[in-house]
């Protein structure tokens, strides 16, 4: 079993930055992929970014366009999502997730992820 706890959400003005953290505990995570998803009001949950814990490879949603960076702090079992140049349309609940399957490419579908955090609210004002 894996437990995921997000932190770092809040209110920020457009153009600002936020740093989200996801602390993982439980089973060994060395072969997992850790990702971030978000759900805006009235929309489906969508893929934001993910990192393969063992290889360090990353993948981003198309809308990110270089604004977000995902990284892992192995010793702390923490995944960081650094979000810059935030826009009002980035307002959403952001969820941390873990995929335990070994895949050729990092998964971007919600149902490919096995464990989820409770989410943290990010609000970007215009």
Image (cartoon, rainbow, N blue to C red):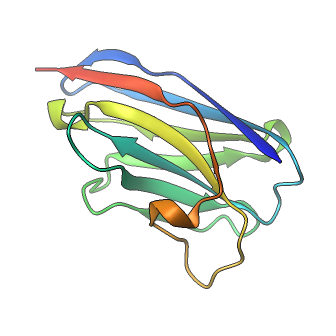
- Please determine whether, in this image, residue 44 is positioned above or below residue 95: below
**Residue at 45% in and 66% down:** 109
Which quadrant would residue 123 be assigned to in this image? Answer: top left
| Observer-nearest of 97 and 125 | 97
Q: Is residue 79 left or right of residue 20?
A: right
On the image, the x and y values in percent for residue 82 come to 46, 37
**Residue at 60% in and 36% down:** 117
| Observer-nearest of 120 and 57 | 120
On the image, the x and y values in percent for residue 27 come to 88, 50
Q: Is residue 84 left or right of residue 15?
A: right
Residue reaching furthest to the left: 126
Residue reaching furthest to the bottom: 104
On the image, the x and y values in percent for residue 2 come to 78, 45
**Residue at 28% in and 63% down:** 62
**Residue at 55% in and 53% down:** 35
On the image, the x and y values in percent for residue 18 come to 41, 26
- Which quarter shows the C terminus? top left
């Amino acid at each position: 079993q894996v437990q995921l706890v997000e932190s770092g959400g809040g209110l920020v003005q457009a153009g600002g930055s936020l740093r989200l953290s996801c602390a993982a505990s439980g089973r060994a995570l060395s072969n997992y992929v850790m990702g971030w998803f978000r759900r805006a009001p009235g929309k489906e949950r969508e893929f934001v970014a993910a990192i393969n814990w063992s290889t360090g490879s990353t993948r981003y949603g198309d809308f990110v366009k270089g604004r977000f960076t995902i990284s892992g702090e192995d010793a702390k079992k923490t995944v960081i999502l650094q979000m810059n140049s935030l826009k009002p349309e980035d307002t959403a609940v952001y969820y941390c997730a873990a995929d335990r399957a070994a895949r050729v490419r990092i998964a971007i579908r919600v149902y490919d992820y096995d464990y989820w955090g409770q989410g943290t609210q990010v609000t970007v004002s215009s």
